[in-house]
Image (spheres, grey):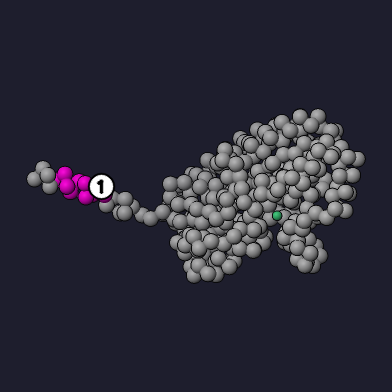
């Protein structure tokens, strides 16, 4: 009898997890969106993502494993504004999971309600390779937009998983409270950066620059996705010397040889800056992203002697 009881207990313990309600499976295109979904979903969601934080989110090579992730997802979240247009729509079509297709309840474009900068007033023209045709898609790099993205994710989770709405509401309240406190810290740190001119490789930083008072003077690329020409580089270096621009910011997925040469020739300091969670292993969540970048920028600006001021 005793043995039977023990066996029964073992049986119950082994099978108990499957009796629990299944977690919502959330799949995001980028690691930033995954980090935000984790903040809101916590124990009630299983979050996965496609583009790693150190990859260029505009260009991700599709893999069969991504299709499997898409097939299983209950909620798919993308950055939108065509950031992922080169790879996500084809994966969505091929995954044959109707519930996560655009327009259906399991699809979320995180940009809804966010402050989007650089929206072109003229006709959209991709013929020159411009990969930001509908405004700047790197909008998650503003904490104010992070708050909107989190709210968008929360609304979706309430709708798709109403049984856990109370938990999601508690999680977003905690996230917003931490963001309030962090925004104060970040603004205090960024006060040292106000008005600092920077050159960036890609046009990833308008929301970040606006949030923290940096001024983006020019880009190493001619325009988003268009490689630099010798004439552009010559003009850029002339401008950097004339305006004493102290910092060059390069995303981790670009070759740093050219930026290093520009830095050497102009006396600027080169920084490999992180546009995403997971870009470096110590950047594990959305708060780390700003902590890390602001610390790096303030240290580097001090090192460069703030040549622009
Ligand atoms: Zn871009």
Give the residue displayed 87% in from the left and 37% down from the top.
244
Residue 298 locus on image (x, y percent): 72, 32
Point out the quarter of the image occupied by ligand 1.
Answer: bottom right
Where does the magenta region start and end? Answer: 5-14
Residue closer to the observer: 273 or 63: 63
* Membership of 250 in magenta stretch: no
Residue closer to the observer: 274 or 211: 274
Residue 191 in view (yes/no):
no
* Membership of 7 in magenta stretch: yes
Read off the residue under disc 1. 13
Residue 141 locus on image (x, y percent): 67, 46
Give the residue displayed 86% in from the left and 44% down from the top.
237
**Residue neighbourhood size for the residue with mark 1, other residues' Cα within 10 Å, grouped as few (<14), some (14–19), many (≥20):** few
Residue closer to the observer: 120 or 229: 229
Picture layout, residue 306 above or below residue 36: above
Q: Secondary structure at mark 1?
A: helix
Q: Assign the N terminus to one quadrant of the image.
A: top left
Residue 76 locus on image (x, y percent): 53, 59
Q: Does the beta carbon of the residue at mark 1 sit less than 8 Å from ligand 1?
A: no
98 vs 16, left or right, is: right
Residue closer to the observer: 41 or 240: 240
Picture layout, residue 240 above or below residue 307: below
In terms of secondary structure, what is the magenta stretch mainly?
helix
């Amino acid at each position: 009898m005793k043995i039977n009881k023990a066996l029964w207990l073992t049986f119950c313990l082994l099978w108990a997890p499957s009796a629990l309600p299944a977690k919502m499976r959330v799949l995001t295109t980028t690691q930033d969106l995954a980090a935000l979904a984790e903040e809101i979903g916590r124990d009630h969601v299983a979050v996965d993502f496609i583009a790693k934080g150190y990859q260029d989110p505009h260009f991700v090579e599709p893999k069969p494993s991504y299709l499997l992730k898409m097939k299983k997802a209950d909620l798919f979240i993308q950055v939108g504004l065509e950031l992922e247009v080169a790879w996500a729509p084809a994966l969505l079509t091929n995954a044959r999971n109707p519930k996560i297709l655009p327009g259906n309840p399991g699809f979320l474009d995180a940009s809804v309600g966010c402050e989007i900068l650089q929206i072109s007033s003229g006709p959209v023209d991709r013929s020159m390779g411009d990969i930001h045709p509908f405004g700047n898609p790197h909008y998650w790099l503003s904490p104010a937009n992070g708050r909107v993205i989190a709210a968008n994710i929360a609304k979706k989770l309430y709708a798709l998983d109403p049984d856990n709405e109370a938990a999601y509401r508690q999680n977003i309240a905690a996230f917003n409270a931490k963001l309030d406190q962090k925004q104060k810290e970040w603004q205090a740190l960024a006060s040292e950066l106000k008005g600092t001119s920077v050159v960036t490789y890609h046009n990833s930083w308008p929301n970040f620059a606006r949030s923290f008072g940096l001024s983006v003077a020019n880009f190493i690329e001619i325009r988003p996705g268009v490689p630099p020409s010798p004439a552009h580089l010559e003009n850029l270096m002339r401008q950097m010397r004339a305006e004493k621009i102290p910092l060059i910011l390069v995303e981790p997925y670009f070759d740093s040889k050219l930026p290093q040469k520009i830095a050497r020739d102009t006396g600027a300091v080169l920084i490999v800056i992180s546009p995403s969670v997971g870009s470096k292993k110590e950047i594990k969540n959305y708060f780390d992203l700003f902590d890390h970048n602001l610390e790096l920028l303030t240290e580097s600006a001090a090192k460069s002697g703030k040549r622009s001021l």
